[in-house]
Image (spheres, helix red, strand yellow):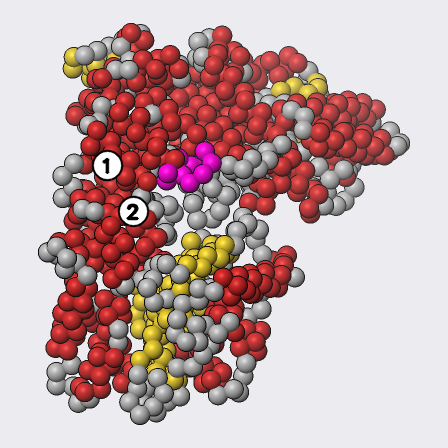
Amino acid sequence: MAEGARSSLSGRGPGGPAPSLDLATFAPGLGKTCEEYRATYRERLAEMVRRGESGVRVASMHARILDGLLSALYCASIAAAKTHGRGPRGRTALLAVGGYGRGLLGLHSDLDVVVLCEDPGDPGAALVAQALLYPLWDLGLEIGHAVRGVDETLALARDDLRTATTLLDVRRVSGDASLVDELLRGARRHVFEPAMSDILTALATDTDARHERYGGSRFLLEPEVKNGCGGLRDLDVILWTANVRWAARSLEEAVAQGVLLHREAQELDAARELLWRVRNLLHARGEQNGGSGRRHDRLTFEDQEDVSAQMGFVDDGVSLGVEQFMQTYYRHARVVETGVERMLSRARHHDRKAPAPLEELGGGVLVFDGHVTLRESEALERDPALALRLYRQVVRRNLPPYAFARDAIARAAADPVWCERLRASREAADLFLELLTHVGDAPVRRGSMLAELHEVGVLLAMIPEFEPVTGRVQHDVYHVYTVDVHSVAAVDRLRALMRGDHASDLPMPTRLAADVPRPMTLFLGVLLHDIGKGRGGHHATIGAQLSVPIGERLGLTPGDVLHVRWLVEEHLSLYHWALRRDITDPDTIAEVVRRVGTLDRLRDLYVLTVADLSTTNPNAMTSWKARMLDDLYLATAAWLEAPAGQGGEQGEKRADAIRDQVRVGFVGDGRQAELESFLASMPDRYVLANPVDVIRAHARVVRDRDARTVHVALRPGPSEEVAELVVVTDDRPGLLADVAAVLASSRLDITTAQIHTRPRAGSHDEAFDVFQVRRTGAAEGEPVDRELVSRIQKDLEDLVTGRVSAKDLLARRAAPPAWARKHMPAVKTEILVDDDVSPRFTVIDVFTRDRVGLLHAIARTLHEQGLSIALSKVTTEGERVADVFYVTDERGAKLRDGARVAALKDALRAAIDALAERDAR
């Protein structure tokens, strides 16, 4: 029964005083019989779920099993009451409502019933209900219950949507059929017909509110199968709407009345089957794992892996079985979410009381009642380009599409022959590109014209190569959207950049996006950048190949086709260079220049990278990543703009110019010479990687060390939750591992690190390391304060002087017990060692799951292998980290020795595996 529609009976609930009419006395052995009945059928249902039988069949059988139990108990209650002379005075009936009323019940769903009677004040009716319920409570069933009369029920339904929806699901289990017929006739005459418009509006409002309450999207990483977008509740709303508007109580009846196409009903039936099968498996898992039999309707990461295997999805070398399963789930959820939108629109369209004026726009399109619509929907069949012509007028007139016209386009786009004819139309191709590159908001859902075209099926009709990535998910916590939704969002981010919406938080990409001379190729490159996913192999290379026939079909020139192909093929390159390579190294910049070639290509690739990264998940574009991308762009642009043969000198000139700016801020300082000494001792890569004011602040931190063994300074970071810690001490082997241990023991995660060593007159070389850190665990989101910094400094002093070990410090931050850790998708560990990336260093890339003490374990291993770390870059992508180390051996040279590289990989993997084993305990 819907929330708000329940009322409790007088007397006790489970565990209270004995009922005034005890069926156990009237029928000895009844309790044992009921228990055996339920146990037998529960095992039968569980076996059906294990065998993979139809989800709808299992849910339907569960309802029928309970019908038998409740019908028998109801009849026994009536007989017992009459035997004691306390039976009901008039007609009564036992009604199933809610999911039970629909005849579909989850394995551990609540049971909702109403005892309908002629006189709700009749004590005999309440006594029957009470006698019925106690055996059910004793069986452990959760029962929503009410005793009501017909008039009382209709009065409640007129005032409350949730009560009204119970009347749409009413089903007689036992008792007087004429009383139930009276209730249903009264509901139609006194509730649904007079308040039809209000009820439909309330259903639409309630559906939107529920979607927001359960995450606002069907593409959640862990979707809610019952109440989420595209879930089973949306299927209920489809049938409620059809019942209210057309008195159709099933999809078949809706088809018979022309409300649904046969194909649409088949798709909804298939979605219902999948959702019920998933829900049954979730309920079965809840019983197996917890033994409580509590229902569990959220599809968690752990559930996804287990459910996908039980449903027969297996890894196929291209994608994981769980990814295939979730793609299937999201596609069915999309059918349901789209179905509920269309059904509500169709039903509410019929509420119009008077005709609205028309305005001809030509080409088969007109304005009607403030909406753009089709003169006749049948024209779509002979003129497919009419669909895009309508949307061009939506943009030009800034008026929304009429619901029935939108519906007609969506129905046409489901026909493969119609889609093929649409793609063959030159006009359609031109209109599609015009709409794709429209920068302004459109009067459609979410303001996105591309999202609208995708929702009605026109995007897939024009680019069928998009179909494999529709609903495709990556089984991790970093990519939070399906590939198609992310691609559309990236295009929308490009539109926002071109409009200037992100001038404050993304100033450089905003400025460069506004200067793009040929937006069409950039828009198409952004749309297609992930189209190669899910096909096996490297998706950028596959996507580049797919982009060629797409571009040619859309009428691009050969040059534009090649540019789109290049953007798709290189769309990951700038991100990898910026975050995993030393962008102050002239050799790195030279490689970027060779791959990019021109300023136009560099600008487009940079803007594409920002649009891509900033829509991967809400937190993917950090200020540090934005700074790295900006600096790489500026360094590469300076090289490209330099006279021939002088590109390599631009970095040095830029570093010298920055030093001159920094020195201006030192003038007049009492210890100016020390500040300038720091500046002179730092390499160009440090100078190029930091703003002028930051370099000045760092110089003062180093100056203020004086005679301290360790000096730790706290500085503002790029955001409130990320702080900058500067550590200055005498350099020694293994120092990074020690600092990482201290920070990990203080529940700080390192998001990036700059490792530097500088000569110090008359003393040891000095380590100058800069870390951006954030709190984790219970303190996550809290700023790093000076009290914590003082503790870090003391711990470092104790570690450096040998008073405490790194192992002791890390023991202070024990990993949480296995039972308290949330299951996350697996992260593959990869270790790459490259001697060719840098002329001076061997570069080690480590990709693995983020864990407490990971950086310490890696840095300690590198130290034990006799390696010195010159540069470290730490990037966190959800649960996955990409840690990069520029290292040299004991002689200051690259590794090169194959046997030593193999031993290094083994040692790093062993250290990471040891952390995984620790966390598993």
Which residue, as the protein is rendered here, is positioned at the far left?
Answer: 643
Residue 132 falls inside the magenta stretch: no
| Mark 2 closeness class: few <14, some 14–19, many ≥20 residues within 10 Å | many
| Nearer the observer, 90 or 684 | 684
Quarter the C terminus occupies: bottom right
Report how far apart the C-alphas of labels 2 and 1 lie in the structure.
15 Å
| Mark 1 closeness class: few <14, some 14–19, many ≥20 residues within 10 Å | some
Which residue does the image show at 49% across and 62% down from the upper left?
Answer: 898
Q: Which mark is residue 563?
A: 1
- Which circle, 2 or 1, is nearer the viewer? 1
Identify the secondary structure beneath mark 1.
Answer: helix
**Residue receiving disc 2:** 609
Which residue does the image show at 46% across and 57% down from the upper left?
Answer: 832
The numbered mark, 2 or 1, whose residue comes first in the sequence reads 1
Which residue does the image show at 40% across and 64% down from the upper left?
Answer: 842
| Nearer the observer, 600 or 15 | 600
Q: Tell me if 74 is positioned left or right of 665 in this view.
A: right
Quarter the N terminus occupies: top right
Q: Tell me if 404 is positioned left or right of 254 in this view.
A: left
Looking at the image, can residue 84 be seen?
yes
Q: Place residue 184 in its image quadrant.
A: top right
Tell me which amino acid carries mark 1.
His
Q: Which residues are magenta?
A: 532-541
Q: Tell me if 61 is positioned left or right of 301 in this view.
A: right
Residue 668 in the image: state x and y as whole percent: 12, 85
Residue 606 in the image: state x and y as whole percent: 25, 48
Q: Place residue 107 in its image quadrant.
A: top right
Which residue does the image show at 23% across and 66% down from the upper left?
Answer: 688
| Nearer the observer, 650 or 506 | 650
Residue 734 in the image: state x and y as whole percent: 46, 77
